[in-house]
Amino acid sequence: MSVPVLSAQVIGKSYGSGANRFDALKGVSLDIQAGESVAIVGKSGSGKSTLMHLLALLDDPDSGVLLVEGTDAKKLKAKELNRLRNQDFGFVFQQFFLTANATVLENVVLPLTIAGVGAKERKARGMAALEQLELADKAKNKAKNLSGGQKQRAVIARALVNNPKVIFADEPTGNLDSATGTVVEDILFKLNKENGITLIIVTHDTELAARCDRQIFIRDGLEETADSPTGTHKRGGAHS
Amino acid sequence: MKFLDIVRSAIQNSFRNKLRTGLTVIAIFIGAFTLTITSGIGTGVTAYINGQVSAIGAADVLTITKAADATATASDGPAAYDPSKSTTVSLGNGSRPGSTIQALTAADLAKIKATAGILSVDPAVRVSPDYVEYADNGKFELTVSQTGTITTADLAAGTQLDNSSSSDQLLLPTTYLKNLGYANAQAAVGTPVSIGITDYTGTQQTVTATVVGVQNETLLGSGAALNRSLVAHLHTVAITGEPAGVSAGYATAVAHFDASATKAEISTIKADLSAQGYSSQTVADTIGAFETVINVIIGVLNAFAVIALIAAGFGIVNTLLMSVQERTREIGLMKAMGMNGGRVYALFSMEAVFIGFLGSALGVVAAIGVGSLISNLLANGIFSALPGLQVVQFAPASIAIIVGVVMLIAFLAGTLPARAAARQNPIDALRYE
């Protein structure tokens, strides 16, 4: 078996201290293999976003060990961490986080700008990413003038522009109507299938989760042991 | 992120909220404008004074007086009588009314002559002519410039005085021309004028002299300058009928030293003279006194301008703190995408520096425009009597320093917000709900 891209071993995270202490994550273990698509499913407050932040190396776990391609994340230097997040990871957020007054192209090439790539190459790679998402004609538009679906496609283009190994998507369809949401989902899974990009999707949408190779259900900071997504689906749907 | 990209994004970011940036820029503008104007005045006045000093020449001349008697202070009452001391003499016009100093006697002159570094010493003979007249155009009072004989004049026409000549020469100030009946400065050169002077017995006599040149007015006053021959001639006339035995006492003496003497050597000579009880001044010292006063005034104005800039610095702190707050998510995103804290810090610092640069550049440009305009108006208006005085002048170096200082203040003001930005946690920034 190959070394997993990301491997979490009983990782925990809590916020606050004393009476205010809140254990967001109480010890979750998982392995993510290259090329997989994994859904992290849970209700709001379940700890699923915390888990994603830890996997994306945006935060340090309080307990447990996180291995990135076999290396302990704690042993990585800040510079190496930044390089990893910049070049190996791509991020897609529910809230887009586009700079409203900058052009679409400027937004898309932000990771390249941060990496210190020259202006000419930035433009070429940015346009390539936009073409892949059929947004090339909007390159010079201000980001604020895009529709919701276009914005999320721009965000995916931004996540893609560095040819990452892993894309983290946090509720990627949360702000979109179902038709547009489906288009965005298709794009993400196409990238997973055709480019072999590992996909980690955080969602509470079970339909989206069901399209992934594997689902990890998080509830109250712990992984729910479920043999199949449908089982959890039934449990979750029992009250509704 | 490359340095150029940081600069570019910082500039773009600072224009994102144009009103807020604009108001901060105005605050800096005011400080930079004031600082440029005051330093411009300093440069202008200093340049004028330096020009005067170098034009006057006479760098090898000390004006020597007897130092005030230290024991004769008001609280101690009068000093004991010393028959060897000479009488006091009044300093005449130009000095504090009623002030007197100890006269220099022949013995004093000998002592001064013996001082190391002094090449020669001449008593300053003071002559007080009654009038000057040119070609029956009427008699006008004649003020004699005490330093005129030894200094180089700033000429409007003609030539300098020739002290080695045996002919009687004088330089007239430009202000005398109209009353005496000359059409212009050039017309006066070479003409004879008659100078009336009253002798010891009270009889008025006339001496004829040639106008060799016309001089512009200077800070040293606007008297006519007489050459050595004319002074001696007038003095001879003035003491006609003086009884024998009247001891000669001089208010001041003029000593020459080596023209190539360094500042340190001049200081040594002055210290030696001072030790012997004589106070001495070079022409530069006399004019330097003006400069000191002006420098103090400019220093105070500069201090106010710097206070304005410090206040503007807090404006920058405020602007950028708001900006950091507004852009929390953007900062978080950049950090999530692998931008390190140092670069985030640099981005916001650069924005502060850019705001400082914008305000100071605009302030400096406006100050140069307004300053030049005012300077020209003044030069043709109230300062028209002082040719060559451009009251506001701009030195490229001092302007560069002003812009640099403002940018430094802006950078320091930016440290606080930039630190706040650099310390942002991407998780906090990206959390929503």
Image (tube, grey):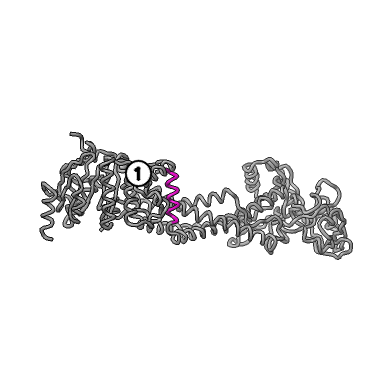
From the viewer's perspective, tell me whether residue A30 is left or right of residue A119. left
Where, quadrant-wise, is the C terminus of chain B in this rendering?
Answer: bottom left
Q: Label 1 belongs to which residue?
A: A161
**Is B113 situated above or below B176?**
above
Point out residue B54 in the picture as x, y percentages from the top left corner. Answer: 69, 48
Report the residue that reaches farthest toward the top.
A1
Left or right: B340 as drawn, with respect to B85:
left
Q: Give the magenta-colored segment's residue range.
A: B2-15
What type of secondary structure mainly makes up the magenta span?
Answer: helix
* Chain of the residue displaying label 1: A
Camera-nearest residue between A232 and B309: A232
Please indicate, yes or no, whether residue A120 appears anywhere in the rendered image.
Answer: yes
Q: How many marks?
A: 1
**Quadrant in the picture for residue B218:** bottom right
Q: Secondary structure at mark 1?
A: loop
What residue is drawn where x is 18% and y is 49%? A210
Q: Which image quadrant is residue B18 in?
A: bottom left
- Residue under the image location 50 percent in, 49 percent down: B404
Seen in the picture, residue B233 relative to A117 is either above or below; the reply is below
Q: Position of residue A31 (x, y in %)?
A: 18, 41
Q: Is residue B311 visible?
A: no
| Type of amino acid at the residue the image marks with label 1 | Val
Residue A188 image offset from top left, x and y in percent = 27, 47
User: In this rendering, would A227 be left or right of A52?
Assistant: left
Horizontal and vertical percent for residue B283?
68, 50
Quadrant (top left, top right, bottom left, bottom right) of the N terminus of chain B: top left
Observer-nearest residue: B89 or B84? B89
